Image: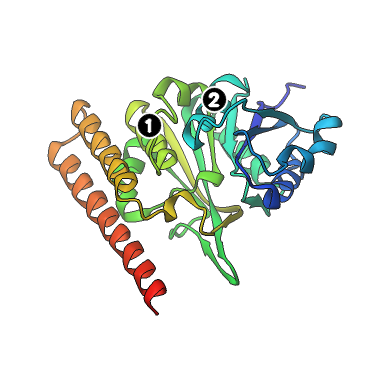
Amino acid sequence: MKARPSVCIIIPTYNQGNYIVKAVESALAQNYSNLSVFVADDNSDDGTEIFLEAYIRTKKIFYKKNAVNIGRVANYHQALYKCTNAEWIINLDGDDYFTNNQFISQAMNRIQAIGESYVLFYQGANIYKKENYEKALIPEMEKDDIILNSTDYFFMYYRTKYFSHMSTLYNRCNAIESGFYEKNIISTDIYSVLKLCLNINKQVIVSKNISGVWLQHNLNASKTLNFLAHWKNFIGYASLYKLSLKKNRFNKLQCLKWIVNVGGRYIYMYLNLVKNSFTKNVF
């Protein structure tokens, strides 16, 4: 019997000792048969390796601690390019966790039913959790899943906002070919997936299938108020617009509409972030 395609859950982490065990346990609970778990520790100084000692010793996980802190995006990049040869990858940040132990099996079943060579990535859903508040972020569609051309996924993004990093199972070779995690911006995950859609024309599976919990707290990269960080992020979206213009198969007006909508929504989001922070500090 032919072995299932290899899948690696990459868990990038930095000083997330209070969360990391739950993330690792949820990864190990996945029932997929050809699975590895790799923890990419960006030189944590909170004893992360002590929390994971038993998993490392029993070789339930692969663990690498960087000699120096290289930063969030560089850590993503290094883990994907140098630390695994798995055919399919899913990223689970060290403060998030899976709640559906069949998620990867279900995703791979769907991918294989269509044909691995035809699928760019499988995109599921997640639960947004902040303190006592929880909300399932599920795509609004009639069916349990839909199949889109990668181009359609890109141009529909500003309307649908389907993206979920912890619920994206993607082909490693395609991701490396496209240049995943090469831009050091807040939204390097969304940027990398949208760039992938522009560079490689294949099918994308969008599903209501929930992978787990995306935990919100003040240390989330997206919560920073640093204007320069958000400006770099906006410029990242602008570079996708420029890339779309270089693709002869795209209508220029369609590309312009995309950047106007994405840029406008991003600016609105940042102003709300500043406003909410100001209100919280004043009142």
Whichever of callouts 1 and 2 sits on the residue coming sooner in the sequence is: 2
Is residue 48 toward the left or the right of residue 191 in the image?
right
Of residues 34 and 269, the one drawn nearer to the viewer in this rendering: 269
- Marks 1 and 2 close (CB-CB < 8 Å): no
Q: Is residue 34 visible?
A: no
For the C terminus, the image quarter is: bottom left
Q: Is residue 274 above or below residue 208?
A: below
- Scheme of image coloration: rainbow
| Residue 165: % across, % down | 50, 44
Which of the pair 149/278 is nearer the observer?
A: 278
Q: Is residue 210 above or below residue 152?
A: below
Q: Position of residue 94 (x, y in %)?
A: 63, 45
Direction from residue 27 to residue 118 in the image, left or right: left
Q: Amino acid at mark 1?
A: Lys
Look at the image and tell me whether residue 279 can be seen.
yes
Q: CA distance from mark 1 to mark 2?
A: 13 Å
Residue occupying the point 34% across, 26% down:
199
Q: Quadrant of residue 191?
A: top left
- Residue 192 x/y as whole percent: 40, 34
Quarter of the picture holding the N terminus: top right
**Residue for point 25% across, 34% down:** 239
Residue highlighted by disc 2? 78
Q: Quadrant of residue 44?
A: top right
- Per the image, the residue denoted by label 1 is 183
Residue beneath the point at 43% across and 52% down = 222
Residue type marked 2: Gln
Q: Secondary structure at mark 1?
A: loop
